[in-house]
Structure formats: structure tokens, C-alpha cells
Amino acid sequence: MENLPESLFSESTLISSLSRCNISSSHVDMQQNSHDLDGLTPNQLVVLLLDSNLRGDVMYQLIKMRDTCEYLAPLLWNTFNAVYMLLLEVISVYWKLSPPTLSMKESTRVCNALALFQVMAKNPETRKELIEAKIPCYFYPFLKPSGDDKPLEYLRLTSLGVLGALAKFDDPYGPKVLHFFLETKVVPSCLECMDLCDELSGKVATLIVMKILMQEKGMSYCCATPERFFSIVQVLYRVVEKLTEKPCLLHLMYVIQCLLSLSEIQKVIGPSEAFIRQVHPKLFDNTFKDILRDDHETAWMLQVLHFNVYGRLSPPE
């Protein structure tokens, strides 16, 4: 990947980049605050990512432009050393992950860097480049559960947001993204988030697993061994248990779709008592009746799941 140096720790790279970008030393050394940067164009701001003193404010300004600057993703990717600077922000806090000593201010700064990676993840052209360069691997350390530590929870949620943006398996490059996810074991990391992290992270992680299970290759991976299959089903059981205490329609829909995909395996191998025991019975009583009342599509998905599990539709109310 031509945009990144061979090593993240090369001192000569920054010097070379300053020369190639024709930035004068007086420009790089200037001291500006967010207000001073307001009038700069995206092209001018991206170059200023090279200055560690300005980088925090520059990232903030660029994030404000993500919905209005259509070329921000390729600009970030193609500006020499821009991705490198964002990666420096990401890896700079690794040593504070265990034990967790990250401050909220530090977390916010890294989240801003991750948000710019999410901009690139949403763009079809730069999504491909991110995967080919294996850039998402730098975000995986943030996925590990950390109890109630809020700064790390924000990092985790933002990292999952980047992975969720990449998980567009229906576009031309989708199969390679899926292969990358399976190869780098995204599913086990997402299962941990679903099982042990807070509601928002769990919801996004469930969405990613749902999208993987809806792909034939993803299903094959998840059902390759009984251990892998039942590890997913058991986590989904525990997610349903948590949803009985704090219902969320969208999260419930993701869970039902995951189970619906997994239940298709019974059409191949026949009914499985072990699987039936791991599908939470509260899905089919009146526990979620109120939140499903006006969502006929999800209610129908639940009926199909009941049929796949028990061989019959659930009785009418």
C-alpha cells in the first residue's frame, strides 16, 4: 500500500512527507485553535494532520465535513501520510488498554481518528483499500471487553462502527470484505461484545454477526463445527435474556434474524434437540408482545423461526 510507510515507527517518514507536501516549517509550526481552522478547505486541513499539535483540532474539523465533502474519503486515503498519522493516533493508546488508564479526552481524540476511518469505510473505493491493507486489524484491540470503563467503551463502539460500515457484503467487493472478516476472526470478537459489553456495542456487534450469517460463506464458517455453531447460539440466548430486562426492537430484530439464519441448518441436518434448547423460550411467549405489536415484519420473522425450530407456527394470540 503506497500511502503507508513500511513501519509506523519510521522517523524519516514524517520528514519525507513534509518535503513532498511542500509544507514550510513556519506553516507546520504555527499554533492555531479550532476557530482558526474553521475557514480552511478539506485539502488544507488534511495536510495539517502531519502536525501533532494541530492534529486533534484538524480531525475534529474534518469530521464536521464528512456529510458535506463528497471527496473526503479518497482525499484522506490519497494524501501522503494522512492514513499513517491517523494510525499513529490509534496505536498511541494501546499501552493504556490493560489495565485501563485511558482518559475521556484521550478516548475522544482516538474516536475522532476512528471516525475518519469510518468515512473511508463507507466509500466503495477506499473500503477496498482499507481491506487490502488490513487496516481494520489495528482496531481489534479495542474490541476486548473492559467492564464499565467508559473511555474504552466509546473506543469499542466507534471501532465496531467502522467494522459495521465495512460490512456491506452486497457490493462488488463484498465477498473480499467477508473473507477478511472471517480470516481475522471478527465473529468471536463480536460475540464477546454481544455477551459482555454494554447495550450499544452489543447491538452493533449483533448487526455485524447478522450480516455475516446472511451470507452463504458466512453461514458455512459459523456452522463449520458444532462448537462454533453453539457458541453463537448460546450467546444469542444470553442476549435475549438481557433484552427481556431492557427491550430494544432493533436489537431484537437482529437477534431473530441471526437465529433465523442458523435455523436454516436444520433443513439440512434435521431437527436438533440441542438447538431447540438453546433458542430462548421467551421469544415465543408474550415477553416481547408489546414492542412487536406494530412491527409486522419482525413478528413474521419470529413466526418463521418458530416454524423452523418446532415444525409449526406459533398459535395465534
Image (cartoon, rainbow, N blue to C red):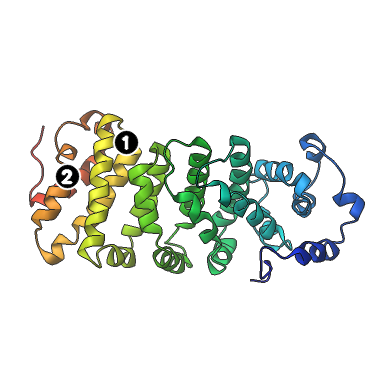
Above or below for 6 versus 245 = below
Left of 254 or right of it: where is 133? right
Q: Residue at x 52, y 59 (%)?
A: 136
Res. 1 image quadrant: bottom right
Q: Residue at x 16, y 49 (%)?
A: 278
Left of 182 or right of it: where is 89? right
Query: Where is mark 2, residue-wise?
Result: 303
**SS at badge 1:** helix
Comparing labels 1 and 2, the label whose residue is closer to the camera: 1
**SS at badge 2:** helix
Left of 225 or right of it: where is 65? right
Confirm or deny contact between disc 1 and disc 2 (CB under 8 A).
no
Where residue 140 appears, as percent x and y from the top left, is 48, 55
Picture disc at residue 249: 1
Image quadrant occupied by the C terminus: top left
Residue 114 versus residue 317: which sits nearer the camera?
A: 114
Q: CA distance from mark 1 to mark 2?
A: 16 Å
Above or below for 69 versus 1 = above
Picture disc at residue 218: none
Q: Residue at x 17, y 42 (%)?
A: 280
Q: Residue at x 12, y 54 (%)?
A: 274
Q: Residues within 10 Å of mark 1 (few under 14, many from 20)?
A: some
Residue 155 in view in this figure: yes
Where residue 141 appears, as percent x and y from the top left, is 49, 54
Name the amino acid type tagged 1.
Leu
Name the amino acid type tagged 2.
Gln
Residue 195 versus residue 261: which sits nearer the camera?
A: 195
The disc, 1 or 2, on the residue closer to the chain's N-terminal end is 1
